[in-house]
Image (cartoon, rainbow, N blue to C red):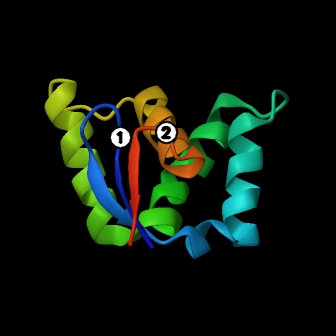
Amino acid sequence: MRHITTSTGFSADFDEQNANDMRVLRHIRAIVDPEASPLQRTAALVDLPVLLLGEKQTEALYAHLGSLHGGRVPPAELERELTEILTGGGEAVKN
């Protein structure tokens, strides 16, 4: 478990074991696949934060992004935040 703070200031606890799941990898593949349609990419992006962070922290992430973007959660910004969380971007403190 590590506490993360992204470059935009979102802060959460991230259990790295959540990323060790084929469902997560399948969603990531759909997001980065250059042959995937925009609809396939967006559909995968909808489920990924819940698999990684759980419902409560996903809602906190949406609220955070909404506060930065006039109440909206742009898919590209969500993807950027999730990439930071997965790659250890921003600030991470191991617990």
Residue 89, disc: 2
The answer to which quarter of the image holds residue 53 is bottom left
Q: Position of residue 9 (x, y in %)?
A: 24, 38
Q: Position of residue 94 (x, y in %)?
A: 42, 65
* Foreground of the two, 26 or 5: 5
Which residue: 69% across, 71% down? 20
- Mark 2: which amino acid? Gly
Tell me if mark 1 has few (under 14), some (14-19) or many (20+) residues whose alpha carbon lies within 10 angstroms of its own. some
- Mark 1: which amino acid? Thr
Which residue: 30% across, 59% down? 12
Q: Quadrant of the C terminus?
A: bottom left
Task: Establish if 13 lies above or below 46.
Answer: below
* Foreground of the two, 94 or 22: 94
For label 1, the residue is 6
Q: Position of residue 16 (x, y in %)?
A: 56, 68
- Horizontal placement of 5 versus 63: left or right? right
